[in-house]
Image (cartoon, rainbow, N blue to C red):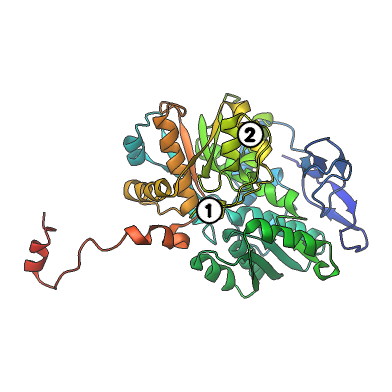
Amino acid sequence: MAVQSVEATTADTTGTPAATVSLGPAAALSCRECGERFALGPIFACELCFGPLEVAYDLPTGDPESLRKQIEAGPNSIWRYAPLLPVPADVAEKQNLNPGFTKLVKADNLARELGVTGGLFIKDDSGNPTHSFKDRVVAIAVEAARAFGFTTLSCSSTGNLAGAVGAAAARSGFRSCVFIPHDLEQGKVVMAAVYGGELVGIEGNYDDVNRFCSELIGDPLGEGWGFVNVNLRPYYGEGSKTLAYEICEQLGWQLPDQIVIPIASGSQLTKIDKGLQELIKLGLVEDKPYKIFGAQAEGCSPVSAAFKAGHDVVRPQKPNTIAKSLAIGNPADGPYVLDIARRTGGAVEDVNDEQVVDAIKLLAQTEGIFAETAGGVTVGVTKKLIEAGVLDPALSTVVLNTGDGLKTLDAVAPTTGPTATIRPSLDAFRDAGLAR
């Protein structure tokens, strides 16, 4: 099936001469608020209303079955969906980390524990190259950075993104310089630093880091820098759509009835919804109702608080939670998350740190999946929603685990360790009550 490749003439934000870029089916950038369209380029806010920009497409037309076959014949990575993404047609031949097509685990043991009868699945994105879903979004941002002639990849990060940017830059030949809060989990700090780029700790929380990066973009010091989650954000966010594509393909080209998604900035949730809508529009899945549920940690739950209060405005909070990868007190896509949860009949809920730890252990002990704290949030919220009668256990449900528990050992270490320490003898083993 042919895909239209759209060329656009753009100028980057540092005054570099205009260049012609080709990003596959990407046609323009469109304002999510007023609908104004702009040529493809490293811009992220509407010049008219300051609303966020997102990629608009000329998507494939024709027989859905042919497109399905084309996708299924593609590589076992997100590049099987290249006809639906803002990337060049030959993206799979370039130097990149090839993330995606991670396991969709049928979680029958956890389902029995939670009383789910309609089918429970864990989309386990800990299998990506740097062990989080951030590899998906960074891979798309790298292609935009190449197209726009950037030489340095950067980001503000709560940890996982820093590692993903460092690894992708090393693989694809970019310099990297990433910024993180000074008090991140040590595992994430080491993982972000090991790839050899610059890693800079900022005194403050994630929102302080993000403000600093926004200032750097407007300064000559930032010339030639592609900030994946700022001036490349419209392209970066599209990587999350691939979670929706994969889930539906792995379910036999069907929509799930319910899906539980963690909320940090909220972009992942909004882009998964966008991906589901695109699959419906293309005829790749049968249109049917689905519900989207957002999950937050109680110590940083501005979207959950707004949902429960019936508000359309999300009031910022100062984060205080072990789920640091979700600790964004002023989430950019918060209002859009509220819209989607309400439109689909879902909800936004939160769990406290103790419930997060309990859920991490529950998933590990039932399915052998060691989730980071964000996965503990989604599993914990799923349990809470079922017990409250909000999430229907008779429907098919997909729960996202977006990272590896080895990155957040501190969360479970205080309550997890050896069952017993004994002398090396059979008598000691028997005395410890372990012989059964």
Q: Where 194 falls versus 297 (above or below)?
A: below
Q: Are marks 2 and 1 in contact (CB under 8 Å)?
A: no
Taking depth in this image into account, of 72 and 322 the one nearest to the observer is 322
* Residue farthest to the top, as pictured: 288
- Quarter of the picture holding the N terminus: top right
Q: Residue at x 50, y 36 (%)?
A: 251
Evaluate whether residue 227 shows in this view: no
Q: Residue at x 57, y 37 (%)?
A: 305
Q: In the image, residue 216 lies at what x, y percent?
A: 78, 64
Depth order, front residue of 283/379: 379
Q: Secondary structure at mark 1?
A: loop
Tell me the distance, in whole angstroms, between the alpha carbons under discs 2 and 1. Answer: 22 Å
At 22% from the left edge and 60% from the top edge, which residue is drawn?
419
User: As drawn, is 349 to the left or to the right of 389?
Assistant: right
Residue of label 1: 320
Task: Kindly report which numbered mark, 2 or 1, lies closer to the viewer in this rendering.
Answer: 1
Given the image, on which type of amino acid does mark 2 rest? Leu
Task: In the displayed orientation, state which residue is furthest to the bottom.
Answer: 196
Mark nearer the N terminus (2 vs 1): 1
Circle 1 Cα neighbour tier, 10 Å, few/some/many (<14 / 14–19 / ≥20): some
Please name the residue that numbered disc 2 is placed on: 338
Asked which quadrant contains residue 99, the reply is: bottom right
Q: Secondary structure at mark 2?
A: helix
The amino acid type of the residue labelled 1 equals Asn
The label on residue 160 is none
The percent coordinates of residue 35 (x first, y second) are: 83, 35
